[in-house]
Amino acid sequence: MADRTLAHRAQNVTVTEKLNLPPTAAPTNHGKTVAAWFTTYAVVIAFTVAGLGVAFALEWLFWVGIGLIAVSLVVARLLVSAGYGQGGAKTRARQASHGGH
């Protein structure tokens, strides 16, 4: 059992670590961006298509679903690059026009 007495704590000073905080405040949109919503819906739909391919033993439908997953991830990355992701220019402009929400 650990010694938690006042005398023990006085003799064994706890060393605190320096906080490493980010240089600026994190975005307040909680990930609710066009890129995030697109990615979520597209990947769920694509996985559903692939799952239906497995459930009905249709190999071609499974591969269509897998292809849709790949395409949706590429489009999502393009949306982030275009400024529709977390901290992007389009997202910040949209937040400013909606009063920060």
Image (tube, rainbow, N blue to C red):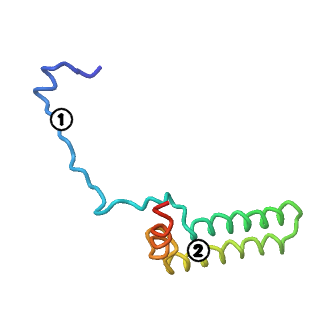
Give coordinates of residue 39: x percent, y percent: 62, 68
Nearer the N terminus, badge 1 or badge 2? 1
Among the 4 quarters of the image, the one containing residue 41? bottom right
Q: Residue furthest left?
A: 11
Residue 34: x %, y % from top left: 58, 70
**In the displayed structure image, the side of residue 16 where residue 92 appears, left or right:** right
- How far across and how far down the image is residue 87, in percent? 43, 69
- Report the residue marked by disc 1: 14
Q: What amino acid type is highlighted by mark number 2?
A: Ala
What is the number of the mark on residue 76?
A: 2
* Residue at figure coordinates x 79%, y 67% from the top left: 49
Residue, x 20% and y 42% (percent of image)?
16
Crowding at mark 2 (Cα within 10 Å: few <14, some 14-19, many 20+): many
Relative side of 31 to 57, left or right: left
Q: Amino acid at mark 1?
A: Thr
Q: Where residue 36 appears, x then y in whole percent? A: 57, 66
Q: Secondary structure at mark 2?
A: helix
Indicate whether 13 appears above or below 101.
Answer: above
Q: Nearer the viewer, residue 22 or 55?
A: 22
Which mark is in front, 1 or 2? 2
Mark 1 → mark 2, Cα distance in angstroms: 46 Å
